Image (tube, helix red, strand yellow):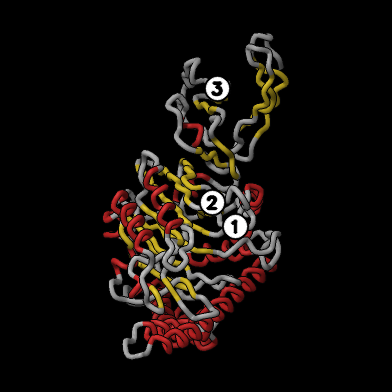
Amino acid sequence: MSLSASGGFSGLAVHQGYDGSREIRGSVVNPGNSRESLVPEERSAQPANVGPTTQSPQTRTQPTLQIRRGAQTRAAPPANSLTQNGWNIIQGDIPCTQDPGVITNISPLKDPQRLRQRNNGAALRLATLNIRGFGNPSVFHQDNKWQHIRRLISTRKIAILALQETHLSTERIETINCHFGKSLIIIGSPDPENPTGKSGVAIVLNTELFRPERIKKNVIVPGRALMVQLDQGPSSMNILAIYAPNVSGSDGAENAEFWRIIKDHLPSTKPEIMLGDCNITEAGMIDRLPAHDDPEEACVALDELKQRLQIRDGWRTTFPNEKRFTYLQSATGSQSRLDRIYATDKIIETAREWEIGTTGIPNLDHCIALVQITNEHAPWLGRGRWRIPDYVVEDKDFLTFAQEQGELAQKELEETQTRTSHQNPQRIWHQYKQKLIQKARARAHQIIPGLQRKINATELDLSRTLNDPLIPEKQKMENARTIQIKLAELEKTRMNKIQKEGKTKFRLEGETPTRYWSQ
């Protein structure tokens, strides 16, 4: 197909997508007879009744291709957008002449109606973690950390995860998005000087739990400060992920300059949540072991940024006197709470489940900090349906009880001759289920898995050690280091067990027409 030389299409081909959407590939012929390749986003959602974009000659920098299908129209991505795994991500401010509908997207790999029902619930779990590098260069290798990160996000049900020291180049980000694109999308900012060997920040979205309609990306400090705006319906969430420079002794000039740059170069929309590795503490007497204060210059600069954004340290606000650390220096035993989540008062008031815990990911020296925030526009949800834990279903005592009670219920059904309000199959079945539930609840308290019981006991021991004022500081450092290393090994064992169980299930059900296969 071709049009006149004064402008139009030439050599276009129409491709059908999995979701019924159409993609037109070919070239656009500009009035100046210049030819420009144009491939519209394949998996963009089609906003209804969106008309052509009106642009003045001064602001129009590229031709706009409108794909009309019935009453629906789709525009080509704007010039300042990039595509990651089927998502159009806007970088920087969006010109007012651009059609905002171009950033809307629904993946064809899953049913959109089902996603709307499952995602964006009443509460979202946020977390921050310093991963200390990329690991093995191949994402398929067992020593690559992204396999572990994906499993961590899945098991802890994390919707948004901020990562620091990622060592992610643009190519690595594309590879990870391609490999884990079914459930994750990674938005990263690499270090401009050494992207695969220094700093780097990223924000990972778990699209199984949270699926924004639009993502806007702003890089404030390359490799160290990344802000994303996540639009969902009438509300939006602005998150700033940071990885601050280290402080050395009393020299905090570089760290202080980092906070000043962020304060002076904030976009028009301020972040409501700031999380990441701050590399300083605000209260060194309680957030460091051994206790000492950080350089005043850096602390003052951070405090000025907090006042500008009107945010507070959520974990310290919830636990004003408790000691818990996120970084362990194994050589000396010193610890500090460097990884923090700051939020506005409005978010902190309704946030819950502030946690600091180990991850089980190899070769890490940081713990993960988590919080669950609520979605003010979501409907109220109850406690949900209780289910029998998997380890109880496999318990021999419970299975024997279920077999015996089932035989009694079957015998009672066979002996029932006359149906009454007190003697009928529905009542017998209900009584049988209630007996199973009571037995399952009792066994669940009795047979907590041995590994989980050890982890719970070790965490309690660590908390008691850190918060005991009678233990001398030097002895406390040594004891806490030993317990922390033990806790990390237990968590690593638990994650390896989960990995083996997942591989076994995939081997058994991955190629069979079951619910596991369809997901």
Q: Amino acid at mark 1?
A: Lys
Label 1: few (<14), some or many (≥20) within 10 Å?
A: some
Residue 166 higher or lower than 420, as above or below:
above
Label 2: few (<14), some or many (≥20) within 10 Å?
A: many
Residue at the spot 38% in from the left edge and 59% down from the top edge = 298
Foreground of the two, 24 or 311: 311
Please tell me which of labels 2 and 3 falls first in the chain: 3
Q: Is residue 2 visible?
A: yes
Foreground of the two, 365 or 88: 365
Q: Quadrant of the C terminus?
A: bottom right
Q: Which disc, if any, is residue 61?
A: 3
Please tell me which of labels 3 and 1 falls first in the chain: 3
Give me the C-alpha separation between circle 3 and circle 1.
35 Å
Q: Which residue is mark 1?
A: 198
- Circles 1 and 2: CB distance less than 8 Å? yes
Residue at disc 2, secondary structure:
loop
Please tell me which of labels 1 and 2 falls first in the chain: 1
Residue 416 percent coordinates (x, y): 42, 79
Residue at the spot 49% in from the left edge and 24% down from the top edge = 71
Residue 67 higher or lower than 197, as above or below:
above
Residue 148 falls in which quadrant of the image?
A: bottom right
Q: Is residue 448 visible?
A: no
Residue 223 in the figure: left or right of residue 509: left
Q: Amino acid at mark 3?
A: Thr
Foreground of the two, 280 or 21: 280
Q: Which residue is mark 2?
A: 223
Q: Amino acid at mark 2?
A: Gly
Residue 87 percent coordinates (x, y): 55, 42
